[in-house]
Structures are given as structure tokens and as C-alpha cells.
Image (tube, rainbow, N blue to C red):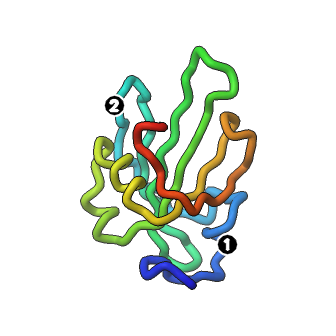
Amino acid sequence: MTDPGVRDAACRCLRPPLTHTDFERHAVGVDETGGRFAEVAVECCRHCGQWWLEYAYEVEAVSRSGRWYRGAITGAQAGALTPEVAPTVLAGLPWHLYGGSYFDTTGARSEAPLDPASL
């Protein structure tokens, strides 16, 4: 079964590892909540047009702390996104992609909703 917001269930943008050249990126800003200083961006897949919210950060003083989260969103959500609401938007999605040195993976899919407190 596909998500109502996902444009093409067969597109490679749904399966890590991801190639950044497959996306048009638009920086949204930095979420300073909890001292994370997470980079927030929206990306649009060049192949299928799917919008993605990307949330990424690392703790500079901690080795292997880099992590990123991505969730499929609508164009309306992409247009209204602010850095501070990005964790809440991710938490409201039924699934998400995640990866980075913290998780020791180039990317995986989680069917569990993301808990913003765990970021």
C-alpha cells in the first residue's frame, strides 16, 4: 500500500542510499531547539516531484553523532515549513527515512512515527 502523499511508489527517492543530485534543495533554516542547530531543508525529487523534509544535525563535540531524518510531505507543507515546526511535522508522518554515523547506516526506513523528544 502506498501513502496518499507519495507520488510514485517505485521512485528511487523512497529507498536509501540517496543521491543528492536527484533533488532540488531549498534551505529553510536552522532549528536551534534544544541546542541542536539542525539544518532544515525541503527537497523536491527531480524524477517524480515528491517533496521531502530533511532534518539533519550533529553534536560537534561527540564523535559519530551525525544524523538525518527525511519525510515525504506535500507541496503545501513544504511551502509553510519553518525550522521550529520541522520536528513536529516529521512526528506527524506515518513513516520516515533516517541515517548517518549515529545510526551507522547510509539510510533506512522506519515505520514508527518519530518522537521529537528523541531527536
Front-most of residues 46 and 112: 112
Residue 41 lies, with reference to residue 38, above or below; the image says: below
Q: Quadrant of residue 63?
A: top right
Q: Secondary structure at mark 2?
A: helix
For marks 1 and 2 on the same chain, the one whose residue lies earlier in the sequence: 1
Front-most of residues 47 and 11: 11
Question: Is 76 positioned to the left or the right of 10 in the image?
Answer: left
Instruction: Kindly check if marks 1 and 2 are in contact, taking CB atoms under 8 A apart as contact.
Output: no
Question: Is 27 positioned to the left or the right of 80 in the image?
Answer: right
Question: Is 61 positioned to the left or the right of 12 in the image?
Answer: left
Q: Quadrant of residue 1?
A: bottom right
Marks 1/2: CA–CA distance: 32 Å
Identity, as a three-letter code, of the amino acid under mark 1: Arg
Identity, as a three-letter code, of the amino acid under mark 2: Thr
Residue 57 lies, with reference to residue 26, above or below; the image says: above
Q: Label 1 neighbourhood size at 10 Å, few (<14), some (14-19), many (20+)?
A: some
| Mark carried by residue 33 | 2
Residue located 61% across and 69% down the image: 13
Residue to which mark 1 is pinned: 12
Q: Label 2 neighbourhood size at 10 Å, few (<14), some (14-19), many (20+)?
A: few
Q: Secondary structure at mark 1?
A: helix
Of badges 1 and 2, nearer the viewer stands: 2
Front-most of residues 42 and 63: 63
Q: Position of residue 10 (x, y in %)?
A: 65, 82
Q: Position of residue 65 (x, y in %)?
A: 62, 28
Q: Position of residue 60 (x, y in %)?
A: 57, 20
